[in-house]
Amino acid sequence: MTKLSERKNNRKAVLRSLYEAVEANSPAVSGSALRTELGLPDEDLSAACSYLADDGLISVEWTSHRTPATVSLTHEGIRLMEGQEEEHEVEQTARRAQPDD
């Protein structure tokens, strides 16, 4: 069984990959492309996608084997990722503004 920290990392990786696809004007990603990019086994990718879909952050079209066929960020997922990007930018700006000791 996958550890909690690994499951969280898998979910973050899925969101990050989908957000990058949205930024590249590709609103949906095939499950096989996502699996290959992230290097996740079917069961781990399916678990991550199920969790994120239940939270309303992604939309998933499932195959008959309950693996993701197509995955995309929902409006809420995009808002979450944009918020994280803004936080990251604020942190980077604050670090650059700190004087060197």
Image: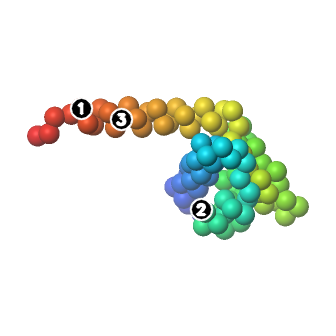
Q: Residues within 10 Å of mark 3 (few under 14, many from 20)?
A: few
Measured along the vertical axis of the image, is residue 15 above or below residue 83?
A: below
Mark 1 or 3 closer to N-term? 3
In the displayed orientation, state which residue is furthest to the right.
64
Looking at the image, which is closer to me, 88 or 12? Answer: 88
Dot 2: what SS? helix
Mark 3 or 2 closer to N-term? 2
Which residue is denoted by mark 3 in the rendering?
A: 91
Amino acid type assigned to the residue bearing label 3 in the image? Glu
Which residue does the image show at 61% across and 63% down from the upper left? 37
Q: Position of residue 30 (x, y in %)?
A: 74, 57
Find residue 44 and report its image quarter: bottom right
Find residue 35 and report its image quarter: bottom right
Which residue is denoted by mark 1 in the rendering?
A: 97
Mark 1 or 2 closer to N-term? 2
Looking at the image, which is closer to me, 18 or 7? Answer: 18
Find residue 40 and report its image quarter: bottom right
Dot 3: what SS? helix
Which residue does the image show at 34% across and 37% down from the upper left? 92
Q: CA distance from mark 1 to mark 3?
A: 10 Å
- Dot label at residue 6: none
Which residue does the image show at 60% across and 31% down from the upper left? 79
Looking at the image, which is closer to me, 30 or 44? Answer: 30
- Of the 4 image quadrants, the one containing the N terminus is bottom right
Q: Residues within 10 Å of mark 1 (few under 14, many from 20)?
A: few
Q: Residues within 10 Å of mark 2 (few under 14, many from 20)?
A: some
- Dot label at residue 38: 2
